[in-house]
Amino acid sequence: MKQSILFEWLNINPHQPSSTFINPHQPSSTLININIHQPSFFTRMAHFKRTASAVWQGTGAEGSGKLDGPSGVLQDTPYSALKRFQNEDGKAGTNPEELIAAAHAGCYIMALSFRLSGAGFTPTELRCSATIDMDNSGGGWAFQKITLDLEASVPGLDEAQFQEHANAAKAGCPVSKALSAVPIELNAKLGF
């Protein structure tokens, strides 16, 4: 993660020796003072890499593969063309689109949470689903669009502020940036 993105999420000015945060909506909130010029939880990771791997055996149509990653969440997770293309509801097994959608939804609400917290609003709960629309009409599968459906409970935040923060987080989310070749729509609803 680039430091500038983290600073934007936390609303930190990197040219000031320290930034102070307090949530004005919680009378008993704790004052947090972060000195960005000393090693801390947030600034130690100005750069990092994440990896995952895949192994495929057999033909594209009849073969199958396994996904893996260092966290163990994907440990030997099976996938195949049959599960990917011949299963409309997506429940027979995982596929690359499901993994990208999960990564996008997770990254987006984390970015939004950082942004809201930096502005003094503590989210009670953020829920997001990402839907990837696939299209094969052009002679090969392609992402047609991604839709982020957000529901949020954020005390003290009005609708205009919510929409502003929701859209800014969409634009600043690292996964949104990586997927910027695809139209990304946001349906943001404040309140459950």
Image: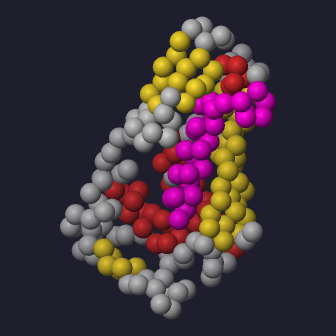
Question: Quick one: which residue is furthest to the top in this view?
Answer: 59
- 121 to 53, vertically: above or below: below
Residue 92: percent from left, percent from top = 71, 30
Residue drawn at x 36%, y 57% is 4
Residue drawn at x 34%, y 56% is 3
Q: Quadrant of residue 126?
A: bottom right
Residue 161: percent from left, percent from top = 62, 73
Q: Quadrant of residue 112?
A: bottom right
Asked if residue 39 can be seen in this view, the reply is yes
- 146 to 3, vertically: above or below: above
Residue closest to the eye, 27 or 62: 62
Residue closest to the eye, 169 or 28: 28
Residue 122: percent from left, percent from top = 54, 75
Asked if residue 164 can be seen in this view, the reply is no
- 175 to 121, vertically: above or below: above
Residue closest to the eye, 124 or 42: 124
Residue drawn at x 55%, y 44% is 103
Q: Quadrant of residue 156?
A: bottom right
Q: Magenta region: which residues?
A: 87-113
Give the left or right position of residue 46, taking residue 59 as reference. Answer: left
Residue 137: percent from left, percent from top = 77, 21
Give the left or right position of residue 108, taking residue 6 as reference. Answer: right
Magenta part, dominant SS: helix
Residue drawn at x 53%, y 70% is 116
Question: Quick one: which residue is furthest to the bottom in this view?
Answer: 27
Give the left or right position of residue 90, taking residue 116 as reference. Answer: right
Q: Quadrant of the C terminus?
A: bottom right
Residue closest to the eye, 23 or 186: 23
Q: Is residue 134 magenta?
A: no
- 14 to 157, vertically: above or below: above
- Asked which colour scheme the image uses, the reply is secondary structure
